[in-house]
Image: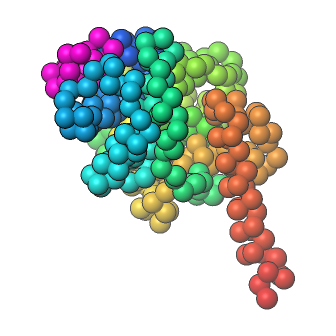
């Protein structure tokens, strides 16, 4: 976690010897107990750093533990106002403030200090964004044709690799990181696969024949002697495949097929959920397959499904055309 450690060093240097023990404990908590991703860890530390820098100016001194406990709602609102003046969008402001909330939540949970003032401050309201799936036909075409854009020198096995990855995203509803974290042997346990998602939460995913066939074709064509426990999907240098490679492959096929800019690898996961729901899938089952902790997250797909049905109606029903 070299990037995260660099953030930690910056935080310690810039602020505030008084808060150093608290911050260090929180960082350890994020890694050992919350088990956040490197990306989340870096964002939290960066945003807390911004908050403490603001307090240094706001209080005209380096903040101490006692200052954190005495902050009023107006102080937190001043911080949000300062972030707005920095040019942050409402989404970025909400993300930035969520790190501050997480820090205070930890302090309260650990009986270090409690400040209810932060609970009186609302995060910036965000426009509700629905998941943006692509059509069933577009998903199938993207998977079928993505292999056409592999480099000639490695075309055969790289083409089959890219097809296998996209088939996993659409056929199993995986996140890109989940698909790329698979190792050789993870799919050799019958018709069920165990996937490790966010916060190391495991879930079971049924394997449809299209997925196992695509992965098997890639594995047999791969020139590397991959053994159980090795990364399943590798780049041309033999290392675990990077998400950027998948994004670039999808970008090429998206442009070739004239698909919208929303046709990203993650859109295939959205399409998996939406198409299951359209076909009569149970919302709770889809929640389990996607690994959503909260059903309300999965319920967004009901809005997508409704929008899809209305679109079909408006385009197909004779009365709708009058």
Magenta part mainly helix, strand or loop?
helix
Image vertical order of residue 181 relative to residue 286, above or below: above
Image vertical order of residue 69 relative to residue 217, above or below: above
Left or right of 319? Residue 10 is left
**Image location of residue 264, percent across then percent down:** 47, 50
Residue found at the very far bottom of the displayed protein: 322
Tell me if residue 275 can be seen.
Answer: no
Residue beneath the point at 64% across and 40% down:
297
For the N terminus, which image quadrant?
A: top left
Residue beneath the point at 48% across and 50% down:
124
- As rendered, which of 141 and 98 lies closer to the eye? 98
Residue beneath the point at 45% across and 60% down:
261
Residue found at the very far left of the displayed protein: 13
Residue beneath the point at 65% across and 44% down:
272
- As rendered, which of 272 and 294 lies closer to the eye? 294
- As rendered, which of 267 and 72 lies closer to the eye? 72
| Res. 73 image quadrant | top left
For the C terminus, which image quadrant?
A: bottom right
Magenta stretch: give its range: 4-23
Left or right of 89? Residue 121 is right
**Image location of residue 170, percent across then percent down:** 60, 42
Tell me if residue 269 can be seen.
Answer: yes
**Image location of residue 226, percent across then percent down:** 41, 17
- Residue 49 on the magenta segment: no
Image vertical order of residue 54 relative to residue 301, above or below: above
- Residue 19 on the magenta segment: yes
**Image location of residue 254, percent across then percent down:** 45, 58
- As rendered, which of 46 and 149 lies closer to the eye? 46
What colour scheme has been applied to the protein in the rendered image? rainbow
């Amino acid at each position: 976690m070299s990037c995260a450690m660099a953030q930690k060093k910056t935080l310690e240097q810039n602020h505030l010897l008084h808060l150093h023990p608290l911050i260090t404990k929180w960082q350890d908590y994020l890694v050992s107990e919350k088990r956040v991703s490197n990306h989340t860890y870096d964002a939290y530390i960066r945003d807390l750093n911004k908050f403490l820098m603001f307090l240094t100016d706001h209080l005209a001194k380096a903040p101490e533990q006692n200052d954190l406990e005495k902050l009023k709602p107006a102080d937190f609102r001043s911080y949000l106002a300062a972030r707005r003046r920095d040019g942050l969008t409402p989404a970025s402001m909400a993300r930035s403030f969520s790190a501050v909330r997480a820090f205070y939540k930890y302090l309260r949970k650990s009986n270090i200090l409690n400040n209810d003032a932060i609970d009186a401050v609302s995060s910036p309201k965000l426009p509700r964004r629905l998941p943006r799936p692509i059509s069933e036909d577009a998903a199938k075409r993207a998977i079928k044709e993505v292999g056409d854009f592999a480099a000639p020198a490695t075309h055969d096995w790289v083409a089959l690799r890219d097809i296998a990855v996209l088939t996993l995203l659409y056929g199993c509803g995986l996140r890109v990181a989940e698909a790329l974290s698979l190792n050789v042997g993870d799919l050799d346990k019958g018709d069920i696969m165990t996937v490790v998602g966010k916060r190391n939460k495991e879930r079971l995913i049924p394997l449809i024949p299209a997925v196992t066939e695509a992965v098997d074709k890639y594995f047999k064509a791969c020139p590397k002697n991959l053994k159980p426990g090795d990364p399943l999907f590798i780049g041309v240098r033999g290392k675990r495949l990077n998400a950027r490679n998948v994004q670039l492959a999808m970008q090429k096929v998206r442009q070739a097929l004239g698909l919208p800019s929303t046709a990203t690898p993650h859109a295939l996961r959205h399409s998996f959920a939406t198409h299951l729901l359209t076909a009569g899938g149970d919302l709770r089952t889809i929640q389990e397959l996607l690994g959503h902790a909260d059903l309300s997250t999965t319920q967004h797909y009901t809005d997508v499904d409704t929008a899809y049905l209305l679109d079909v109606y408006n385009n197909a029903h004779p009365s709708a055309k009058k």
